[in-house]
Image (tube, rainbow, N blue to C red):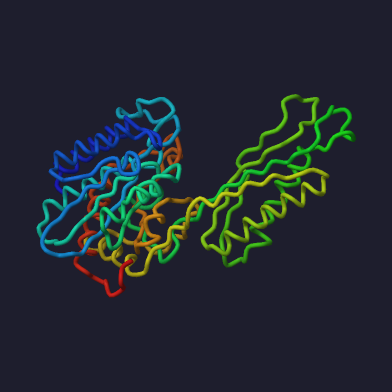
Amino acid sequence: MDRDLHDELTAWRQHLHANPELSMQEEKTSAFIQEKLRELGVPFTANIGGHGVVATLKRGNSDRSVGLRADIDALPIKEANAVPYASQRSGVMHACGHDGHTVSLLGAAALLLRDESWSGTVQLIFQPSEENGAGARAMIADGLLERFPMERVFGFHNWPGLEAGTVQVHRGPVMADPGRFEITLHGTAGHGAKPDLTRDPIVAAGYLIVALQTIVSRNVEPIDSAVVSVGAIHGGTAPNQIPDRVTLSGTFRTYRLSVRERVMDRIRQISEGIAETFEMRAEVLLTAMGAPTVNSEIEEELAVSAARSLGLAVRRDLPPSTASEDFPMLTRDRPGAYVWIGNGPARDGGELHNERYDFNDAILPATAGWMAAVARQALEGALSNASPG
């Protein structure tokens, strides 16, 4: 990537960083993407599944096709960075690097336009609403895969703590299958001085929190991985009253369907058992929100080949993350691969979803370059002995 393009992408990225928008509110972000696609001369279709944009690059006579995806939404976090391009919207910031992902895909478009060596169709997917898990579903429901044919699809996430520009490619699982739970214990309210006349849901909730932590250690095979975390508890309004209910909510993460089903069953069984022990009722709401992000074998190798073709360092040793993505909604009916590209050291605690996080503009040549390279690799048919779909 030449210096002029790198500088231009940096300016675009910092503009998006200063003007973040939450999931389902990405109207100005989408308009900015459309403006830059027009400047590049790339045809596109807007308003796919909300504020989604799909741009299409075609060259030559090949009937092969590939999809490249970037997410575009921000988070409800107040930025703590003192940079000239800090968020201008209080309480909203690009704390996950979707500004960098968006500009990387625009950069890939610019690189592919300059390169006459490839033939086929590249679908550039600018996806809204990743953070709330709704964007990929909405675009698919709006006909994404039928209206914009693609044999396989690729994406990436910047990764703080990984060496800047290094590409980590997993074999199999990359990120976890997310789920949520909400448990309400219905007891009997009364005066705090007469607990014998109540059925105390606060005491029951204490036992329940401890019991839920046995699921991973005692109900999941040690060779598997899972997480069960209580993130919020609500109950009571006065220090001298025992409330009639307490609600606990949290998340669970798994990598395999059988483990997910086991974890969900045990959350329900333990909640109902604790409630019965304390002579009350448990209302349990469990939501499986998506699927694990898992790389297909051929696409994983294409991702490695693309990185190496650019001279980028490749790692294969990092374990999967228990964070989650909605990228696997795109790979339910298509093979694909999702990689991490190093953002460099996480300075001042600037991990993903942290108020001091910032995308590293120095890696834009690597991120945009990898996306363009993996599209070329896929269209060339390298390693394509496996049938897509």
Q: Residue furthest bottom?
A: 385
Image mark count: 0
Give the quarter of the image for residue 348: top left
In the rendered structure, the answer to whether residue 20 lies left or right of residue 249 reads left
| Residue 288 drawn at (x, y percent) | 54, 52
Quarter of the image with the C terminus is bottom left
The residue depicted at 9 percent of the width and 58 percent of the height is 116
Q: Position of residue 320 (x, y in %)?
A: 46, 59
Residue at position x 39%, y 31% from top? Answer: 81
Residue 357, how many percent across, how many down?
Answer: 40, 38
Horizontal side, residue 96 vs residue 308: left or right = right
- Is 216 rendered above or below residue 358? below
Residue at image location 17% in from the left, 45% down from the top: 43
- Name the residue at 19% across, 49% down: 109
325 lies above or below 47 = below
As drawn, 299 above or below 355: below
Against 243, is 253 above or below? below
- Image quadrant in which you'd find residue 377: bottom left
Percent from the top left, x then y, of residue 224? Answer: 57, 64
| Quarter assignment of residue 53 | top left
* Residue 62 located left or right of residue 30: left
